[in-house]
Image (cartoon, rainbow, N blue to C red):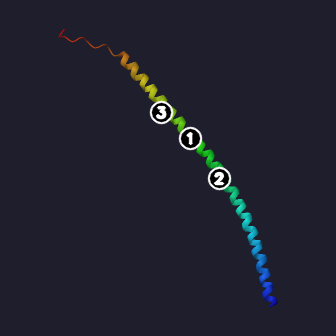
């Protein structure tokens, strides 16, 4: 009976130690998750900025293309009068 009680106490001490280790591991993992969450937020903001920059760049190129087309249209010679007049 005394031996069984000793084994129970020994097992209880072991479980308490393992529980503390698990709690420490959980705290470490929570810190890592928070760190990763912050990094994901930074990446999301950077992605939004990049998307906005690309949109503005496309808009700029379209305006440049429109300017080139308008300049070319002005350089075309005027239409010749028809011979029927």
Q: Work out how far the residue at label 3 is from the one at label 2, CA to CA, in angstroms.
A: 32 Å
Which sits earlier in the primary sequence, circle 1 or circle 3?
1
Q: Position of residue 81 (x, y in %)?
A: 24, 11
**Lateral position of residue 51 relative to residue 8, left or right:** left
Neighbor class of circle 2 (other Cα within 10 Å; few <14, some 14-19, many 20+) is few
Circle 3 residue: 58
* Quadrant occupied by the C terminus: top left
Circle 1 residue: 48
Q: Work out how far the residue at label 1 is from the one at label 3, CA to CA, in angstroms.
A: 15 Å
**Of helix, strand and loop, which one carries label 2?**
helix
User: Residue at horizontal 54%, vertical 35%?
Assistant: 53
* Quadrant occupied by the N terminus: bottom right
Q: Position of residue 82 (x, y in %)?
A: 21, 12
Q: Give the total of numbered labels.
A: 3
Residue occupying the far left of the picture:
84
| Displayed quadrant of residue 73 | top left
**Lateral position of residue 14 relative to residue 74, left or right:** right
**Of helix, strand and loop, which one carries label 1?**
helix
């Amino acid at each position: 009976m005394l031996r069984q009680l000793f084994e129970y106490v020994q097992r209880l001490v072991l479980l308490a130690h393992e529980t503390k280790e698990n709690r420490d591991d959980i705290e470490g993992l929570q810190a890592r998750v928070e760190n990763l969450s912050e990094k994901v937020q930074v990446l999301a903001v950077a992605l939004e900025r990049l998307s906005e920059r690309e949109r503005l760049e496309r808009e700029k190129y379209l305006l440049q293309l429109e300017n080139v087309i308008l300049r070319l249209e002005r350089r075309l010679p005027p239409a010749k009068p028809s011979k029927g007049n």
